[in-house]
Amino acid sequence: MHFNPFISVPRYIRLNTLLMKKAEAMEYFEREGWKFIENTFETYDEFIEAVQHLDDESFMVDFHIKNLFIFPASSKKHFASNELAAEGKLLLQDKASCLPSFLLNPPHKSTVLDMCAAPGNKTTHLAAIMKNKGKIYAVEMNAKRYQTLTKMVEGTNATIIQTMNRDVLEIKDEEVPNIQYILLDPSCSGSGIVNRFASDINKDSNRLYKLSGLQFKLLTHAMTSFPNVKRIVYSTCSVYPEENEEVVLNCLQRIGHFKLVNAAELMNNQWNNFGNETSYPNLGSKVLYARMGEDGYKSDLTNGFFVAVLERCEEDEFNEFYLQKQQNIAVHNEKFGKRKAEKVDENVKEEVQEEIVKPKKKKKWINKGYNQ
Ligand SMILES: C[S@@+](CC[C@H](N)C(=O)[O-])C[C@H]1O[C@@H](n2cnc3c(N)ncnc32)[C@H](O)[C@@H]1O
């Protein structure tokens, strides 16, 4: 994988609507000498073109996220010490990192679990989307990062957030009752982050294996431990399919009662990058990537990011990957008559534990190694 080290993403600034109105922010920027370019573009491509040509004195509003401002990359130093950012009114957050909360889109008064919350960018975005009405449980395992999270929550006036310094894998439904929406943004390789963009050659397959095992465990927990969950967003700042499509596919194959929502439709078919449909049929085109334009991909002018949206199936409905796997097992059993029937949803956790402790040989990408 080749990339252009000179690509830079614009300065994205998310308005904290819990502390400041959009009109006030616009007036502030104009007072500071910035010229507003109105976003009247009909298509995403036209918009991207305009952002690419944003001059050093101008700013715009994002095409998808209406409380996200876009400034030229050259303004990064200027905003690093901005007074309104210090007051929690403006948040320096990349567009890609805003997509998970935007796509989860929990309604006001709903109950949300953010499973991996620190430093709190997405949790506080969720609170703003919910207009500070409802309840968000924000869980962070690492003590130091938990402190950063609590500081951010306090500083942004996101009063519906209850922070918890815990391992989310130990949290059960009784402790966080009636969770309806889950955001899962777990630790990942960070291979999508512009300045540390990793090439295939630099892939650390051992680390990747451990990370994807944890990601799988966390997504399984999200899908099986909270009976009232309607929608789950799974995201990473990685561009490696092992942490993305692979994790989602493995979970869907084992847990039948969730299905993929087509992210392209959620973006009104105005987006450039999705997963790999050839390698992951019926899955790749429904999961979203944000890309900075490396390797001939079209650019979204953001850091590299992955988002998958899952929704609970109707009663008696199972997702296609689960059904296919069950069918394969049935065919295999008929042929060889040896293997016991695959465990069903209720027992999936037991199976997951076994898989994580004892990796099976079928995980070919580990054995092949990526350093070749
Ligand atoms: C990618 S960061 C999350 C970024 C955050 N969502 C944001 O937008 O600001 C992943 C976080 O998950 C935490 N984490 C990893 N495993 C966890 C677990 N089992 N329980 C709770 N937190 C966990 C890590 O310590 C790390 O802070």
Image (tube, rainbow, N blue to C red):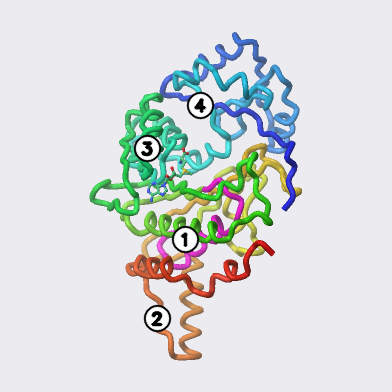
Whichever of labels 3 and 4 marks the residue nearer the N terminus, that label is: 4
Kind of residue sitting beneath label 4: Leu
**Nearest-to-viewer mark from 2 and 4:** 4
Q: Amino acid at mark 2?
A: Ala
Q: CA distance from mark 3 to mark 2?
A: 43 Å
Q: Nearer the viewer, residue 198 or 125?
A: 198
Specify the label residue 91 is tagged with. Answer: 4
For the residues carrying marks 1 and 4, which lies nearer the camera in this image? 1
Q: Residue at x 34, y 49 (%)?
A: 167
Q: Position of residue 282 (x, y in %)?
A: 59, 62
The answer to whether 53 appears left or right of 345 in the picture is right
Query: Given this view, does label 3 or label 2 mark the residue nearer the observer?
Result: 3
- Residue extending farthest to the top is 31
Tell me which label, 2 or 4, sits earlier in the chain. 4
Vertical placement of residue 217 versus 164, above or below: below
Whether pointer 3 and pointer 1 mark residues with C-beta atoms closer than 8 Å, the reply is no
Please tell me which of labels 3 and 2 falls first in the chain. Answer: 3
Relative placement, left or right, of 76 versus 1 is left
Q: Which residue is mark 3?
A: 146
Q: Label 3 is placed on what type of residue?
A: Tyr
Task: Name the residue tied to disc 2.
Answer: 341
Q: Which corner quadrant of the figure contains ligand 1? A: top left
Asked if the magenta segment contains residue 246, the reply would be yes
- From the viewer's perspective, is residue 194 above or below residue 368? above
Q: Quadrant of the C terminus?
A: bottom right
Which callout, 1 or 4, points at the residue further toward the start of the chain? 4
- Residue 325 at x, y = what percent? 49, 73
